[in-house]
Image (cartoon, grey):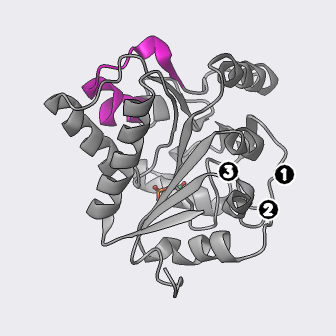
Amino acid sequence: MKIYKAKDYNDMSRKAANILSAQVIMKPDAVLGLATGSTPLGAYSQLVEWYKKGDIDFSLVTTVNLDEYKGLTKDNPQSYYRFMCENFFDHINIDKKNVNIPDGTQENSDIECERYNNVIRSVGGIDMQLLGIGGNGHIGFNEPGCAFETETHCVKLTESTINANSRFFDTIDEVPKEAYTMGIKSIMQAKKILLIASGENKAKALYEAICGPVTPKNQASILQLHNDVTIVADEAALALMKYV
Ligand code: PGA
């Protein structure tokens, strides 16, 4: 595990964007596993800026997103599809045919999970998976206690995740109660993993993920067993790591 300490959110975002951009420059047809949430926003906007300057080309890139709320259509303002378009895809030259996100409108979880697993296989696996981390250590929507062996599955969101995500909705009742998410097994099959974290509310989960036991109680702790993980986190998120 390589851990890079960033000064603050902006520094974290630039470092993460540099790593993603290096991946695309080294392999123009790379498969990027992408994440939603507040943490990656700065990295996405940095990549957009470099694209506009002509420094990076996404025309051959394929993306596979981690998760999507079940029950939301693509054009719902809170869907992760919309989030990715507004914050990234609409501003770069990616071919939307190469964009993959679980289909929140598929009511049959078995069908959707199998379809998405096949998507990941058919693109040849993920070259670099970008991850945020939840305050409870979740990655994607893999909540504490989730079995490590799972591929794409449908999860019931925990109260803490519903509360955390309610800031994007008018009322907490509008937050979907279920989501499709890549499982830990799918994530662990990515060739490289880039985890980013910012802020003191991530410090405990990040510390336990890096230094604690590998346990489903902290889903990110499984990353200790992956052989190519890079963590870019700011000082606040690394506050409990004395020697970084
Ligand atoms: P955040 O979410 O980037 O909005 O903090 C990260 C996560 O919950 O995985």
Q: Position of residue 89 (x, y in %)?
A: 35, 27
Q: Position of residue 66 (x, y in %)?
A: 59, 38
Circle 2 residue: 216
- Amino acid type shown at disc 3: Leu
Secondary structure character of the magenta stretch overall: helix
Circle 3 residue: 157
Q: Earlier in the sequence, mark 2 or mark 3?
A: 3
Q: In this picture, is 167 found above or below 56? A: below
- Amino acid type shown at disc 2: Pro
Other residues around mark 3 within 10 Å, as few (<14) / some (14–19) / many (≥20): some
Report which quarter residue 24 is drawn in. top left
Other residues around mark 1 within 10 Å, as few (<14) / some (14–19) / many (≥20): some
Q: Secondary structure at mark 2?
A: loop
Q: Position of residue 92 (x, y in %)?
A: 28, 25
Magenta-drawn segment = 82-100
Give the residue furthest to the top.
97
